[in-house]
Image: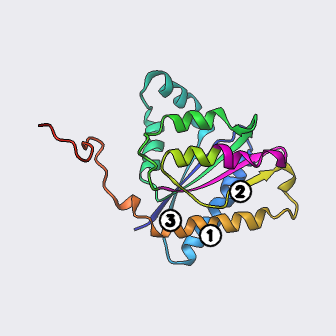
């Protein structure tokens, strides 16, 4: 059975350095998994294309079919690559709005690689004081290496390639051992321990 890898890119521009980083991370993770004999099914969620759906969901509580497909893909994933631009020293509002509509149990035990882009290296700590706690709160398993790419990292020998490789290896190892996509989830199941009497 193929491993399911979901990639969430919260870049707002087109083209986007956030999407470029997401694509490089995805390629590296997929290569690592295939080297070890794992088949991989990749689903890319471009939040820019879902911005109106996310806002409507926040206002009405109902997801459009396209947004529901994205949420279902996350709930069934074996691994997640989450990449956001850094605005005002934290992840983007669109990224946070999307996370706000994810079911609080949907990411439990999900291996996650966090990454971000920004103008300067000064914002790299946002990964550890904003994104990592967010996914820890949702009970995801965040890999130790987070990847930050400043404007100066593109096209230079800054160590970005090595950081991508290290983080990809960490995520691939966890995805190989994940059985989340093989589990059948009943959205109407009662919580463990619930008794009607």
- Secondary structure under tag 2 reads strand
At horizontal 44% and vertical 22% (from top left) the residue drawn is 60
Q: Is residue 116 above or below residue 111?
A: above
Q: What's the residue at 83%, 43% (across, down)?
A: 119
The Cα–Cα distance between marks 3 and 1, rounded to whole angstroms, is 10 Å
The one of 73 and 140 positioned closer to us in this rendering: 140
Residue found farthest to the top: 59
Which contiguous range is marked in magenta?
110-130
Q: Which residue is mark 3?
A: 175
Question: Label 1 to label 2, Cα distance in Å?
Answer: 12 Å
Asked if the stretch drawn in magenta spans residue 134, the answer is no
What is the distance, in whole Å, between disc 3 and disc 2 at their CAs? 18 Å
Residue 115 highlighted magenta (yes or no) = yes
- Mark 1, Cα crowd under 10 Å, few <14 / some 14-19 / many 20+, is many
Residue 190, picture quadrant:
top left
Q: Earlier in the sequence, mark 3 or mark 1?
A: 1
Q: Looking at the rendered structure, which numbered label has been put on residue 169?
A: 1
* Residue pointed to by mark 2: 147
Q: Are marks 3 and 1 in contact (CB under 8 Å)?
A: no
Around disc 2, counting alpha carbons within 10 Å, would you say few (fewer than 14), some (14 to 19), or many (20 or more)? many
**Corner quadrant of residue 96:** top right
- The residue lying toward the viewer, choosing from 73 and 183, is 183
- The one nearer the camera, 30 or 115, is 115
Q: How many residues crowd mark 3 within 10 Å: few (<14), some (14–19), many (20+)?
A: many
> Quarter of the image containing the N terminus?
bottom left
Percent across and percent down for residue 86 are 73, 41
- Helix, strand or loop at mark 3: helix
Residue at the farthest left position: 197
Answer with mark 1 or mark 2, whichever residue precedes in sequence. Answer: 2
Which is more N-terminal, label 2 or label 3? Answer: 2
């Amino acid at each position: 059975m193929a491993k399911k890898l979901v990639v969430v890119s919260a870049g707002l521009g087109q083209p986007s350095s956030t999407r470029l980083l997401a694509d490089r991370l995805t390629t590296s993770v997929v290569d690592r998994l295939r080297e070890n004999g794992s088949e991989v099914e990749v689903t890319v969620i471009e939040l820019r294309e879902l911005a109106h759906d996310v806002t409507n969901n926040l206002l009405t509580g109902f997801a459009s079919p396209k947004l529901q497909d994205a949420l279902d893909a996350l709930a069934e994933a074996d691994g997640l690559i989450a990449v956001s631009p850094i605005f005002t020293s934290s992840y983007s509002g669109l990224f946070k709005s999307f996370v706000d509509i994810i079911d609080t149990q949907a990411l439990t035990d999900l291996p996650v690689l966090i990454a971000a882009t920004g103008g300067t290296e000064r914002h790299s700590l946002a990964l550890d004081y904003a994104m990592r706690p967010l996914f820890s709160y949702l009970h995801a398993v965040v890999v130790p290496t987070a990847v930050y790419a400043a404007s100066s990292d593109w096209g230079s020998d800054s160590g970005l390639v090595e950081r991508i490789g290290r983080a990809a290896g960490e995520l691939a190892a966890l995805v190989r051992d994940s059985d989340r996509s093989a589990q059948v989830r009943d959205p109407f199941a009662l919580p463990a321990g619930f008794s009607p009497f």
